[in-house]
Image (cartoon, coloured by chain):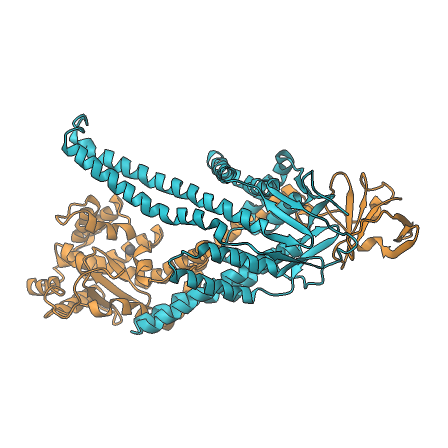
Chain colours: A orange, B cyan
Amino acid sequence: MRVWHYDGLSALRREPDLVADGDAFRLVESDRSEGPYRFADLVARDTVDGDAIYGLKGSTGWRIGFPGGLPADLAPRLPAPTRYGRLIDRIGLWPAAALCATFAAIAVGLFLMTPALVTRAVPQSVERKLGDMMAGDFGDRNCAGPNGPQALAALVARVAPGDADARVSVVNLPIVNAVTLPGGRIVLFDGLVKAAASPDEIAGVIAHELGHVRHRDVLESLLRQLGLSVLLGGLDGHVGGYTNALLASAYSRDAEARADGFAIDALAQAHISPLPTARFFKRLSAGEDAQGIGRLTAYLATHPMSQDRASRFIAAANLHHDDRPVLDADQWGALRDICSADPKARAAGFRF
Amino acid sequence: MHESQGNKAFAFSGDWREFAPIAFTNLLLSIVTLGVYLFWARTRERRYLWSRTQFIDDRLEWTGTGRELMVGYGLAMLIFVIPFGFINLVVLNSAVMRGHPGLAGVIGLVLYLAVFFLTGVAIFRALRYRLSRTLWHGIRGGSDTFGLAFGWSYVWKSVLGWFTFGLIVPWTMTSLWNERWGEMSFGPYRFRADALAAPIFLRFLLFYLAPVVFVFAVIAVAVFGVVAGGLGSWGTVPNPGAMPFVLLAIMAGFYLLFFIVLGVIALVFYSAYFREAVGALRLGDLEFSFTATTGDWIKLFAGNFALVIFTFGIGQIFVGYRNWTFFIRHMHAYGEIDLARLTQSTTRQPGQGEGLLDAFDIGAI
Ligand SMILES: [Zn+2]
């Protein structure tokens, strides 16, 4: 039968006869004969203008075309063309789509779980090194006003008596927020210290952050962000700036609730009233601070406030007895002025 | 042997209704595979577009595969993007923190130039890949070089551009065009390109100076407004409380106008560039020309924009189709091809697709 043919060596279009012989064939013209080729070595290409077109395995540009489609007697001997892709063609479009959708759902689920799993696999020592590296960002802003660090240490010792590793510092930035670095460092910003009405409020915030430390929520959140930025941005040059990442890192609702639970237990054991903490949260969510709402949004952004958060702390107060303030007036004064009374702490201002 | 004067050498015979099933199944499969199918989707789209494109007496054929594209992408990610991200994220940050901002600056600059180099290589290799996967009469194209020299050219011409405040951009664009096409071939024939910067420089200057003119115009309008307001002619503004809102609306209007006007002026330049670039291309005895005017380009972009917006993004699946038909509609070729002398390309076929290009997310043309 007559086919059109390119031999892949020159651009001349030939019109030979295809002469079949068992599972092979030859392409015969009056003055020239090509082949034999095996039918099994043909590769189906897309049908164009009704012509069924085949290429040859291992050859670029070799083509035969059957004008008007494949003759019925040859059809069983020739491979079918790929349409969506070899795998999908084999199982059909809709089953393949359903199968892929199932796998996709599983993959998304696994992806969401990965940071938690990876976090558990990272050794504490590695996490601590990472945290130390990031702490360098704040290095020259750490406040150490007269008796301030001692007051802070006393506060931490009350909240977490058994925890010798708890490392809390105050940094001279006018942001109402606290962040936890990987490895358990907790950084309070001076804005939060100034916004607190009593040391008990700060104790509540620190207890909450200690909850994040205990559950290694920071590392998980960082890993999640890293994963997302790789996935979305392909790490294209603007990933730097840990601090921004930290400030932007919101923990999951579950992690927040867990950290609150930890804080409530810690306050109960330390005989510190949870009511000031509840008041602090309420003040934050109402934006009642005299300094203006703008300063408050930082904590709200990373710790979404809800009515039941404060309620949980209030409810916990029912089980408390003989609570006493976490710091005395002198210590509280020293803590409040930990930055303003420290000439060495670098002046407030934004570097990032 | 084949004259192509008179009727058009390039013709497109597809139909969007025929293409729609391909586009929609591509969309479906891309979604359920979380984007992995995109490589195969692009391949199917090109197979259709190429097969409906006639050059002189025969159709083009796309022989690339989805697997090649995916392998290319995976390799580019593995070899370049992830190490780059790592250096960027870990090394640079820690260097800064250890108090060596100078060192960090040097590493940053080197990284930046390296990205430029790879961008150049990516552009070159994408063109080479496309030619090597395009068949006509069973013959393909390609290139004997890997694009490394072009990558360096891309770097130094870009750097030179910064030092001349961007004024030599037309020269950068045309000379890079000439350089990469000069390395390409189809069958035994080398492409040649001798595009010039001079014919398009005036239009570039228009684009270059437009923002300056615009800023002065805004200042003039603002000053005029304040003066007029002072003279009381704005006394008709109903209440003073609405003033900031009105001002804001005017500002937003200017902002929008700025980008639309600048976009149009950019197309005034780009259309001239593309006509010059394609018009300077030769292959054997073939000459090419591209006839799209600024108006045609505006219609293309406005149409694509409307197509995507009014379908809530789904129309995106037809943008590639529109771009290709636009391209073919305005593409012309003149001259002769001796089919007997058009023999198979001896260039090495690249093993993988446009991975680097994808990885750096660079546009097509
Ligand atoms: Zn929290």
Q: Position of residue A306 (x, y in %)?
A: 26, 45
Above/below status of A209 relative to B307 = below
Residue farthest toward the front in the current orientation of the protein: B198
Q: Position of residue B179 (x, y in %)?
A: 56, 60
x and y percent of residue A208 in the render?
26, 58
Q: Quadrant of residue A185?
A: bottom left
In the image: residue A67, left or right of residue B17: right
Q: Is residue A61 visible?
A: yes
B220 or B72, which lies in front? B220
Viewer-proximal residue, B357 or A88?
A: B357
Q: Is residue A81 left or right of residue A268?
A: right
Work out whether B295 lies above or below A237: above
Horizontal relation, residue B211 to residue A325: left or right: right
At a point 40% along the width and 46% down the height, the residue shown is B206
| Nearer to us in this view, B11 or B122 | B11
**Quadrant holding ligand 1?**
bottom left
Residue depicted at 17% across the width and 69% down the height = A153
Which residue does the image show at 29% across and 57% down from the upper left? A247
Mark yes or no: residue A127 visible: no
